[in-house]
Amino acid sequence: MKETLRRIISGRPLLFTLFALTLPLVTPKIRGADEIEYFAHLRSFVFDGDLDFENEYRRFHARDPRGLAGFKATFLDRREPTNRPLNFAPIGTALLWAPFYLTTHAGVMLARAFGSTIAADGLSRPYIAAVCYASALYGFLGLLCIHASLRRFARAEEPEASWSVAALWLATPVLYYMTIAPGFSHAGSLFCVALLLHLWLDTRVRRDASLGRYAILGAIGGLTGMVREQDLFFLVVPGLDIVWQALRERRLGRGSCRALTMLLAAVIAFTPQLFAYHAINGSFWPSKHVARKMSFHCPHFFEVLFDPAHGLFFWSPILLVAAVALLARMTRFREKVVVLLAIGVLMQVWLNGSVESWSQAGAFGARRFVGSTAVFAWGLAHAWIAISRRFGRGVMLATSLVFVWWNLSLMVQFGLRIMDRQRLDWPRVAINQFIEVPPRIARTTFLFFTDRERIVREAR
């Protein structure tokens, strides 16, 4: 009996149970600028056969003219040299959504043949729901991939492996962007990065891995970059590994072939994005409106981590535990895997610290680090194992729940607008966690499942 219970509350059964419990939280809505940009790629290509987003933007703006006034000023009223509306989003998220979107379209057409009045315009509720639930599924598949990597390559035992994944899921913005705001690219980013790193780890343990495996690795890296351009830099991790192994084994020729194969495959896979850039802004590079926001000397390197109002570790303190444990493990891991993973995260810190909008004000949490979840998992698993061995698994579970409570309470504050949504306002935000959030949980939960729009109205 005890063994059966242990299996239920750990491993994949735990993760599948959590997915089932969080699935009702998925909110099938496309609201903000970023979400509209990602969705417009898909709808425009499927229904119009182009990447001109004029009609999609106007349809979304007409639904909420007041709330999307800023969106209109930025994306409809301004034009690229091609005279098309701006769209800063890459196309990868639309590609991930496409199978679900097209299947839904076929279902809508079939329903209309039997008398349904659902609009088959690519913008009605079934289409929106399809992409939102697709994001939740991709995020979950990414979490399963992370769990598999911890078990196989980090040699993490249960329940530490699954509890690490569950904690990162529920105690960071991962939960928010898999459920409340699935129209963003972050769930897809988590999936692609987790898959890329898992395939790399699997490839590196194969002594005679074929060039085909490196081609697949590069292709997934190209797709990862199309979901979020910054995630393309995770290819640095397998790239450095190839160089390191070639130098250690003194087989530079083989290493060069592997690296070039991976790079060529990544370029080929990323090529559709280059043509999308050209169709939208007339060049094979991101819009000049994006490029001018980058300062590659990274003036905000430490702020994206430690700024009290916007920093990663203040929004999600569990990631500080993971980062410290990752640094501690770097000195013990002979194969240098953790060092390479840490370099991947440092690349993300550098990129995020180079962006003019580094603070991500107005977003929930440090969302640009969601793709790095697969790396933080290695550190957190190491921390949970150490805590379990020294203090017992009860302490590990209690610690996890404290971090989960912090994140869930922040989500309530953010949703009900009882915090400054542009920043963490100390000590107000901490006081609200104890004073304002608990009395509102019951009603908020009730309205969430009965009338979600009323939550927004009452918050205003």
Image (tube, rainbow, N blue to C red):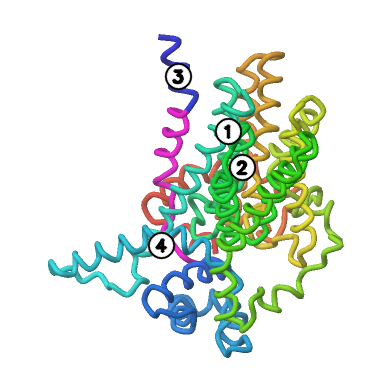
Q: Residue at x 60, y 43 (%)?
A: 409
In the rendered structure, find residue 197 and report the number of the disc placed on it: 2
Residue stretch rendered in magenta on the structure? 12-31
Q: Visible in this render: residue 412?
A: no
Which residue is tagged 1?
149
Separation of residues labelled 1 and 3 (CA atoms): 19 Å
In the rendered structure, find residue 98 and report the number of the disc placed on it: 4
- Which residue extends farthest top? 1
Which residue is tagged 3?
7
Q: Given the image, on which type of amino acid does mark 2 rest?
A: Leu
Report x, y in % for residue 203: 60, 38
Report x, y in % for residue 47: 36, 76
Separation of residues labelled 4 and 2 (CA atoms): 24 Å
Sooner in the amino-acid sequence: mark 3 or mark 2: 3
Separation of residues labelled 3 and 4 (CA atoms): 36 Å
Sooner in the amino-acid sequence: mark 1 or mark 2: 1
Q: Is residue 27 magenta?
A: yes
Sooner in the amino-acid sequence: mark 3 or mark 4: 3
Label 2: few (<14), some or many (≥20) within 10 Å? many
Q: Given the image, on which type of amino acid does mark 4 rest?
A: Ala
Mark 1 or mark 3: which is in front?
A: 1
Name the element at disc 3: helix
Q: Given the image, on which type of amino acid does mark 1 rest?
A: Ser
Residue placed most toward the observer, 305 or 231: 231
Q: Do the residues labelled 1 and 2 touch (CB within 8 Å)?
A: yes
Q: Given the image, on which type of amino acid does mark 3 rest?
A: Arg
Name the element at disc 2: helix
Q: Which residue is drawn at 53% across and 46% down?
A: 440
Which secondary structure type mostly characterizes the magenta part of the structure? helix
Report x, y in % for residue 259: 68, 50
